[in-house]
Image: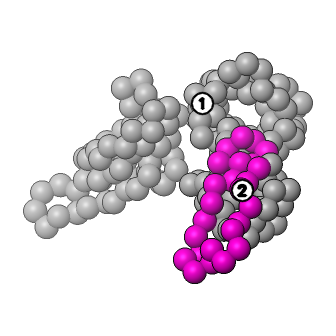
Amino acid sequence: MATTNDLKNGMVLNLDGELWAVVEFQHVKPGKGGAFVRTTLKNVLSGKVVDKTFNAGTKVETATVDKRTMQYLYADGEDFVFMDLETFDQINVLGDTVGEAANYLLPEAEATVATHEGVPLYVELPTSVVLEITYTEPGLQGDRSTGGSKPATVETGATVQVPLFITTGEKIKVDTRDGRYLGRA
C-alpha cells in the first residue's frame, strides 16, 4: 500500500481489480480546500487512458510488475515464446499481449517482458530495430522532385514506407513505436 503522495510516473496501481500505470500526476494544493492529486492512468492490458483525481494522502494499492529482459525464440501458433536470459525459463506470451511489437520481432531479438504474478502484461521493444527489406518496387528514374516514399516489405512481413532510393536486400533502421523509416543501417 502506498499513498497518493508517493505516486511516480510508471508506477502500476491495482484499482478495482485492474492494473493501471501512472502516465502523469500532479499534486494540486488550492488556496481553499484540501489538496488533491490529479493523475492520468493507462490500463496496462487494454491501453485505455483515463484521468482520475484522488484526495491527497489517500491509500492506493500498488501492483508488483516484474520487468525482465528476455530473448524472443519463436512463434508457436498464435503465441510467442520468450526465454528469460538469467534463468533460461521459457514463457508463452499471447499474440494479443505482444500486439504491434510482433511486426518488428525477429528470432533471438531481446525485448522487455513485463509480468504480474506470472502473467505477461506487455512486451517492450528497443526504440529502433534493424530489418532487411525483402521486397520493394524499384524507384523510377526522374521521380525525385517530391522526395516521395514507397512501401517496402521487411523480413518480419511488416510494411514500412521508405524513400525511393532504397532497394531490396538493404538493411534499414525502423522506429518500433510508430513504424517509421529512420535511415539505412
Task: Give yes or no for residue 156 being in the magenta stretch.
Answer: yes
Image check: 152 left or right of 61?
right
Residue at position x 29%, y 53% in the image: 38
Q: Alpha-carbon distance for marks 1 and 2?
A: 33 Å
Residue 97 badge: 1
Amino acid type assigned to the residue bearing label 1 in the image = Thr
Q: Position of residue 137 (x, y in %)?
A: 71, 56
Q: Nearer the viewer, residue 132 or 11?
A: 132
Q: Secondary structure at mark 2?
A: loop
User: Which one is in front, 43 or 98?
Assistant: 98
Apparent side of residue 149 relative to residue 52 in the rendered image (left or right): right
Q: Main secondary structure of the magenta part?
A: loop
**36 lies left or right of 172:** left
Callout 1 environment at 10 Å: few (<14), some (14 to 19), or many (20+)?
A: some
**181 in relation to 146, above or below:** above
The residue at the point 72 percent across, 40 percent down is: 157
Q: Nearer the viewer, residue 143 or 124?
A: 143
Residue lying at the far left in this picture: please name it. Answer: 32
Amino acid type, residue under disc 2 in the picture: Glu
Please state the horizontal and vertical placement of residue 71, each as a whole percent of the image.
Answer: 83, 39
Residue 31 x, y percent position in the rendering = 13, 67
- Asked if one can make out residue 67 in the rendered structure from this viewpoint, the answer is no
Q: Is residue 129 above or below residue 58?
A: below
Residue 70's quadrant in the figure? top right
Q: Earlier in the sequence, mark 1 or mark 2?
A: 1
Q: How many numbered dots are placed on residues in this image?
A: 2
- Is residue 67 on the magenta stretch? no
Q: Which residue is mark 2?
A: 137
Viewport quadrant of the C terminus: bottom right
**Magenta segment, which residues?**
135-159
